Amino acid sequence: MSLKVFLEIVEIKTKIASVFPFLVGALFSATFYHSFHFGYTLLFFIAMLIFDMTTTAINNYMDFEKAHSQTYKFNENVIGRENVSPKLVRQMIVGMILTAALLGFILAYQTGWLLLVLGLVCCFIGVFYTYGPVPLSRMPLGEIFSGVTMGLGITAMVVYINTMSSNVMYLNVDFASGKFSFDGNFWLIAALVLAAIPLICTIANIMLANNLRDLETDIKNHRYTLVYYIGREHGIHLFSYLMYASYVAILVGVLLQVFSWPLLLVFLTLPKIRQNLIAHKKELPAPHSFVYSLKNMVLFNSAYVICLGLSLIWQLLR
């Protein structure tokens, strides 16, 4: 297997979807909680990236194995098109899972057991999102699981490893007695959830755009996604509502002083985002329509990250 084929199997270009929650989590930790740990953050980034590539590889492998269309299996799916051995793909997947798990256990040992719990939940959803007799991605739950797992899950774990000493949230475990307790601050956790809402919405929109585009193909392959149940027209409206909800979360965050004023600059992206939403609706179900979800996600979250960076600079200069 060549490096080019490997990168296509893991869809390296889509990993930006997990990088944004990571960056937001790190910057939000520094700007709102005023806490940051470079070593833990770097180790988490490596483990996160490897696991994200693993789930994508599992998705492509399962699509290859479960494909009912021979045209899709050998002309469109990268494994069949490039004549890659399924056994080699399985070995690659196992190797990446073990590597990510090892890094995760090391990090959990250093930072606390809550990270292990959060990581296991996200890993469970990530694996069964595309694996098993009825993968979550083939159900009307794909948008929810992808958005919450990546948008909130990654952000929460990054915040945790950077704020474990300030008791934003912490799991105490006494193995001798078997007792455990969860400590945390409701309002600090609520602020985290608010900060993650734009990520949840924009990442969920990637899955939604994919399902809007592939509705007919998915039905042929017995994939009954959310769009199958609510219809393409309602799916288009939901696509727009999720995008606008991201701006509402930013505005509420500024009003509640969760964010500093530089976050209002995110609204400069609104005209272009609205233009992309209109273009997306016009082009459906053409293959190119999917790109607008990526454009919106990258544009909005790039502005989000930059504005958090500006907030950090503004705080340091005050």
Image (spheres, rainbow, N blue to C red):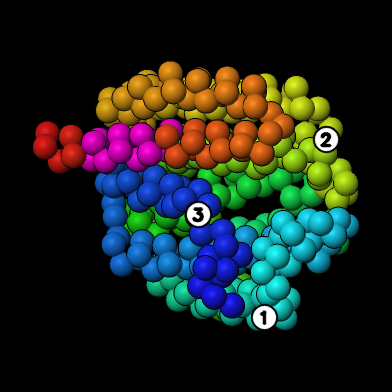
Q: In this rendering, is residue 85 above or below 316?
A: below
Task: Tell me if I can see residue 94 in this picture.
Answer: no
Estimate how packed mark 2 is, as few (under 14), some (14 to 19) or many (20 or more) residues with alpha carbons within 10 Å. Answer: some
Is residue 162 part of the magenta span, yes or no? Answer: no
Q: In this rendering, is residue 166 above or below 48?
A: above
- Direction from residue 210 to residue 317 in the image, left or right: left
Which one is closest to the eye, mark 1 or mark 2? 1
Circle 3 SS class: helix
Q: Residue at left 79%, top 41%?
A: 225
Q: Which mark is residue 13?
A: 3
Q: Please state the horizontal and vertical placement of residue 314, each as a whole percent of the image.
A: 18, 34
- Cα distance between the residues tagged 1 and 2: 34 Å
Residue ID for mark 2: 228
Q: Nearer the viewer, residue 289 or 234?
A: 289
Q: Which mark is residue 88?
A: 1
Which region of the structure is painted magenta? Answer: 300-312
Q: Please state the horizontal and vertical placement of residue 87, each as a whole percent of the image.
A: 72, 81
Estimate how packed mark 1 is, as few (under 14), some (14 to 19) or many (20 or more) residues with alpha carbons within 10 Å. Answer: few
Q: Main secondary structure of the magenta part?
A: helix
- Direction from residue 167 to residue 124 in the image, left or right: right
- Direction from residue 17 to residue 140 in the image, left or right: right
In terms of image quadrants, where is residue 51?
bottom right
Q: Nearer the viewer, residue 248 or 318?
A: 248
